[in-house]
Amino acid sequence: MVNNPSGDEMFDPTFDKIVITIVVVAAIAIFRLTLGAILKRKLRELAGHQLLANFIAVVLSIVLVFYLLNVWGITQALLEWLAALGTITAVLLITMKDVWITNLFAGISLIGDKSIDIGTDVEIQGKRGKIVEMTLTITKVKTADGNLMIVPNKKFREEIVIIRAGKRRR
């Protein structure tokens, strides 16, 4: 018990939080066990009843965690932390835009392009070769003299690429 400025006695807020936490956890556990027993008894023949019971347990656990975070006053700090993490992620994505994201989207468009595939003979920036590997960010082209040329996928969208006629391997 704690004395407040008016002289009245009141309970310690930390003690109240501990009691609320114990009561809520116990109530959720009892509810979960009761619901699990009912589901097991009533829905035994139903395929996937255990999946339903597990789903309900996960939902109850998430609700319990959020409620207890709120009781202990951690929700605000968690939201501030997530906002900071989101800001850092946005800054990193903006700085990586030219290096990685542009190549990623170009790679996705190349995968959908029917005229360019592994085995296609291409000429890019005056160099000829055969595509030997395509990833989301780079394409590897083997030149006639045996060198491996690594081409960022955005070059296939920014430069003039000559696709040589001939047989393509798949």
Image (cartoon, rainbow, N blue to C red):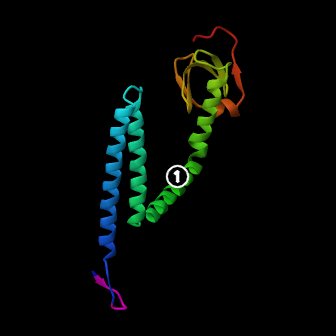
64 sits left or right of 105 in the view: left
In this view, the residue in front, 47 or 156, is: 47
Q: Position of residue 144 (x, y in %)?
A: 57, 16
- Please report the residue visible at 69 percent of the width from the left and 32 percent of the height from the top: 157
**Residue at the spot of label 1:** 89
- Residue interval drawn in magenta: 2-7
In this view, the residue in front, 90 or 149, is: 90
Identify the image quadrant of residue 113. top right
Q: Residues within 10 Å of mark 1 (few under 14, many from 20)?
A: few
Mark 1 belongs to which amino acid? Thr
Q: Position of residue 170 (x, y in %)?
A: 57, 12
96 sits left or right of 57 in the view: right
Q: Position of residue 103 (x, y in %)?
A: 60, 36
Mark 1 residue element: helix
Decide: is 169 above or below 89.
Answer: above
Decide: is 98 above or below 134.
Answer: below
